[in-house]
Image: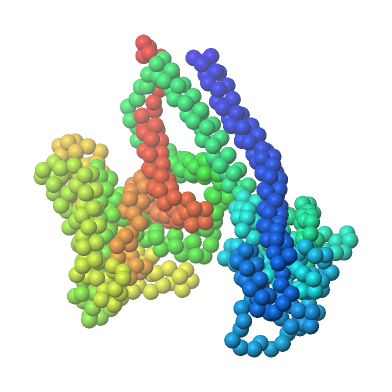
Amino acid sequence: MKRWNALFVAALVAAVILSFFGYKRASGRIFETGTKALTEVLTELRSSLEKDLFIALSQINSLVLETPEGTQTELRYWMQHLLDKLGAADVYCVLPNGESVYTYELPFALPPIDERSEDWYQRAKEMKPGSIVIFSWKDVRGRYVVDLAFRVRDLVFRVSEYPLKSFSEKLANDKIRLTLAALSSKENVKSAVVLASNVYKSGAGIEISQMTPVNLEDVGFLEGKPAIVGELEPSWIAQKRQGIRTFWTNLGLGIVIGILVLWIFIFFRRYRLILRSPLSLTIAQQALSSTVAIFTALIMLSLLVFMLGRSPFEAIKEMIAWAFFTRAGIIETLTRSVPVTLIATGLCVTFEAGMWNIGGEGQFILGAIATTGFSVLLLKDWPSLAVLIVTLIVAALAGALWALGPALMKVKLGVNEILSTLMLNYVALKLLDYLVYGPWKSAKVKNFPLTDPVPVTLGKIKALNVHWGVLSIPIVVLIVWFLMRKAVFGFEWKATGLGFEAARQSGVPVQKSQVLALSLSGAVAGLAGAIHMFGAQYVLQHGFSPGYGYTAIIVAFISNLNPIAVLFAGPLITGLFVGNARLELTMGFPVSVSFLVQGIILVSVILIRNLFLHRPKFVKRGGT
């Protein structure tokens, strides 16, 4: 087996090296291929500009010989013909005396404007016949248009908004930054004015280092000597690098996983697993298993971040810093930890008694429904303190009754409480939707399915900006801890959880203990629903719970069913999920990542604790 181990280690190292150098080589070729593509695009852009201006020049020169020397009516007819050929917005002529002749005879007289002193007129007069001068670049809904001027004998014509169709199409490139700029006339000054660009606005000043000059015969540019400037779009480079990184990472991981699967197959062909008699976990082992589970989840999250092409260090830093070291993150963490910690505290009782309560979510929702129903519909005219006290009691009873059904089905009919409590979660969700979309829907808000707000709120602790319900956590934790560790109930729950039959033979009322444990767990979850409504939610609406009841299961297991440990584990685990939600916002991670992290933590806790309990040992097949 030693040779196989050495071979597999070598294969793993080779896979990692292959992935690393493959990524490095492919990343290095980004600039090589990008530079080649840049050169091609610059050439195509210059050719497209030459094509558009050559078409305009050809159209104009084809009609120059037909330019009339007679009346303004004949001149207007010629300009209409030119306008149709060029597809521009307008054409007009400036006569030697400064008078302007427009394509269409106007029904009113314009104030006389002498344009002979304008730069474009002077430049057109200086150019030889058969040439044009380009100026006044404009971006019209993603299409560039220019004005151009030319002279025929002693007449100067100006064409307004001639479209550069081919040039505009080539300029619309999301991979390369392209700019047509007019260079400064001063020597040794590498500055230019933007004429057209897919990055900058026309008229903006930029500094340039490398450029592709544009030399067009019989075409002058009023703003200065033109040049095309191009560079690779940084976002495109980052996207390409991320794609390459994702590909080689996934390829390397695939090879590594394949090698590990092969090694496991060969290993178990030679060895078999023996589980020894279970031992009780020490406090150190419990703490170690919880810590390892959290770190395992963070490592898996880092790996996922890396596979998505992001920096794992930056992601973990952002997640932890936001949840635990920013005011807004701390407020959100503490607010969300109230229902999670309370529900987890109640779950400790159920799990201690050997019952599986997966219905904390539904019991929490029932508590919120009872809170809204009594406070908004029945007790809204009562004094605030009376409404608060009565509603908290009613919400706890609602959660207890929702859990009582599965408890009775378990002890009387033998129905699996995992299925019954889980299915009742969906019943609670449908009941919630029925109420907020139906009879309880607020008449004040027409477009959203929600109820009227509760008439009483808990207010906020000014120093923390968190509602006073956060103080219920230590109170409930201490009560449950006392019941589990100091009261007779706790002994009965512990004995029932260790073994139903042994507890029954010892005189423990097993069925009564199970019913009481599950009902108490539901009562605490219902109480959490009421506190959440009065402190943070205020209105009942669809999807108001992001899964507090399921997160509480993880907190209970992380705490090894110790209510005191829940007091610290609740905010910690909640903070990790708050930070993960931050990554969804800032880095675009899918929402499912939060559920993935929850699953990893839960599986890790169960696996590691079972390793400590059973102390697995591998022996060669055929041996003992």
Q: Position of residue 119 (x, y in %)?
A: 79, 74
Q: Residue at x 54, y 40 (%)?
A: 246
Q: Position of residue 40 (x, y in %)?
A: 68, 45
Q: Residue at x 70, y 79 (%)?
A: 71
Q: Residue at x 52, y 41 (%)?
A: 307
Q: Position of residue 239 (x, y in %)?
A: 58, 47
When the figure is inspected, residue 455 is found, relative to residue 510, above or below; the finding is below
The one of 511 and 110 positioned closer to us in this rendering: 110
Q: Furthest-front residue in view?
A: 70
The one of 602 and 36 positioned closer to us in this rendering: 36
Q: Residue at x 88, y 59 (%)?
A: 188
Residue 158 position by quadrant = bottom right
Q: Is residue 22 visible?
A: yes
481 sits left or right of 297 in the view? left
206 sits left or right of 593 in the view? right
179 sits left or right of 459 in the view? right
The one of 275 and 356 positioned closer to us in this rendering: 356
When the figure is inspected, residue 46 is found, relative to residue 78, above or below; the finding is above
The one of 478 and 401 positioned closer to us in this rendering: 401
Q: Position of residue 123 (x, y in %)?
A: 81, 70
- Quadrant (top left/top right/bottom left/bottom right) for the C terminus: top left
Q: Furthest-top residue in view?
A: 622
Q: Furthest-left residue in view?
A: 412
When the figure is inspected, residue 454 is found, relative to residue 276, above or below; the finding is below
